[in-house]
Amino acid sequence: MKGVEILSRDGTARYGRLTVEEQALLFPSATDTTEIFPALNNRAGTSIPPADDPGFISRFLVRDGNQPIPVHVHSPTDIQSGETVIAPNWHTLLSRPRDFCQLLDELKGTIPPDTCWYLPGAALPENAAILVHAGFDLFDYIAADLATAQGIFCLPDGQYPEKVMEEGLCSCQGCKSGDLHLHNRIALDQELALIGRRIRDGTFRDLLDGRCRTKPELVSVMRHIERSDRMEQNSPVSRASQFLATSGDSIHRVEVRRFADRLVERYIPPASDVAVLIPCSAKKPYSLSQSHRKFSQAIGRRAHELIMTSPLGLVPRDIELCYPAAAYDVPVTGYWDHEERYQITRTLVRYFTRHPYRRVIAHLDGDARIIAQDAADQAGFEIEFSCRSERLTDHNSLQALSETLAGERKVKSHLVRGMISFQFGYDLKVPNLEVKGSYPDQVVKRGRILYFTTNPSLGMLRPTFDGWSLIETGYRVYIDDFVPQGDILAPGVIDADPVIRPGDEVLVIGDKAMATGRAVMSADEMVRSSRGIAVRVRKVKKLDG
């Protein structure tokens, strides 16, 4: 009996269960792997570095037919779902981050997603997080035991001489008994247990941000993984947890890039030729903050409200609920560094080039004012500044903002069209839809028919079956001829729209039933996996015939 079940994901990091014969093991974890896979005791000819040339691999790589199955980027093999693979010596490429990520992405693309990846002789408390982030699941104690033999005391923040055991840096059983071997193993176990917990909580990326700072090459690996297609495909479109933009690398995270790309490439603004740039607020959603209530009152719906912020760049008022706009937090210093300025300016230039306005008014101060002017110069439009004092919310400044908009017509807001375009990439041109309820908990109806409900905690619209009838294309999952009795499992998925990412709202279509729900996997993983939940089903509708 064998099996791999992925229970939780956080980008490319996974938490799951490996079953071999009668043994079940949760991962990410370290174990004495020879007890689970006895074939490792007698195996030879498999410990080949991943960067060796194809000719060498074809002559010397040996496969004995047992698990874990050796894999190499230059030696394709038929791996089945649920099997365990071993990838020796990948840690030797950590000092070559670009090669590490490119070769691993290439290899991962040839192997079913629901396999367990064993990385031997590599895991230490200080590098465990980046190895899990890279997509490895199972480890052994070889590296930790080698550190013991060298008199090295291991912690997640680095390595120390053995003598520091006496200084009380750790209170584990090994430290209490003066057993360095036991301490190093416990330290690795505890770090992997913490990683598993953070994956389940959806906060692993925040942990990684701090853990990888022990060595420059680990930061470089993180940055390369962050920019990879594999990371984008597996990163959720929304999280229930807060998005903490607490380091300079936050501006390069998938969530930030995806928001900016969807803003420019998908989002359809309301029909207005006047825009007002205003600053962000600590409170989210912005509309609930006192400062934004004052801004909106002064604007009086006579312009399209655009919020400038780091790290997202630009957030239109009508999509301020969309993740991570309503869920991020950033340290406030009053200073934006060069990287932030560049990224925000670039987003503004892209947006205003795609969506030109007759007038752009900036109710900003400090660095934000300078960035707005730079964006206007680069995009080739005139910008007006309305602020007359250092306080944007004082009476004179708000009065100046209101007077700047004198004579402008009111904008007809279309919350639904903006959010639908951003979330689904679809232009919803349906008249007479009514938004009802108390913001941000609202529903979209026409008469008695309910089309959409908002999910403020995730920043998304949830279509009903009637709502899906208005979105004619995209975000479909196609299943076999059965009526779902619960969640949709990957083996039942025939095909899926390639744009689907974890957390997306989807419409499930089969010969016998339709269902609405939320994707657990990306489209690629749904199609290539033979195990695991693909869609969490909310409602099922049987089809006639």
Image: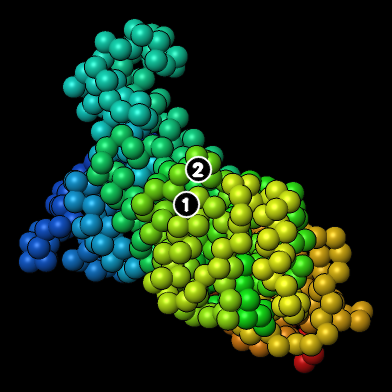
Q: Residue furthest right?
A: 448
Pinpoint residue 297: horizontal percent, then vertical percent.
Answer: 77, 61
Q: Which mark is residue 328?
A: none
365 and 28: which is toward the camera: 365
Q: Is residue 300 above or below residue 69?
A: below
Name the residue that disc number 2 marks: 334
Q: Residues within 10 Å of mark 1 (few under 14, many from 20)?
A: some
502 and 114: which is toward the camera: 502
Measuring 34% from the left and 68% from the top, which residue is drawn there? 109
Q: Residue furthest bottom?
A: 545
User: Is disc 2 placed on a helix, strand or loop?
Assistant: loop
The amino acid at mark 1 is Asp
Pinpoint residue 417: horizontal percent, then vertical percent.
Answer: 69, 79
Q: Residues within 10 Å of mark 2 (few under 14, many from 20)?
A: few
Image-based side of 444 in relation to 380, left or right: right
- Can the viewer see residue 484? no
Measuring 50% from the left and 55% from the top, which residue is drawn there? 368
User: Do labels 1 and 2 touch, CB within 8 Å?
Assistant: yes
Measuring 42% from the left and 53% from the top, which residue is drawn there? 340
- Can the viewer see residue 214? yes
The amino acid at mark 2 is Gly
Pinpoint residue 49: horizontal percent, then vertical percent.
Answer: 16, 52
Name the residue that disc number 1 marks: 367
* Quarter the C terminus occupies: bottom right
User: Is disc 1 placed on a helix, strand or loop?
Assistant: helix
Q: Quadrant of residue 172?
A: top left
Q: Is residue 391 above or below residue 156?
A: below
Measuring 63% from the left and 47% from the top, which residue is drawn there? 391
Image-based side of 511 in relation to 26, left or right: right
- Sequence-wise, the earlier of marks 1 and 2 is 2
How far is the residue under mark 1 from the one under mark 2? Answer: 8 Å
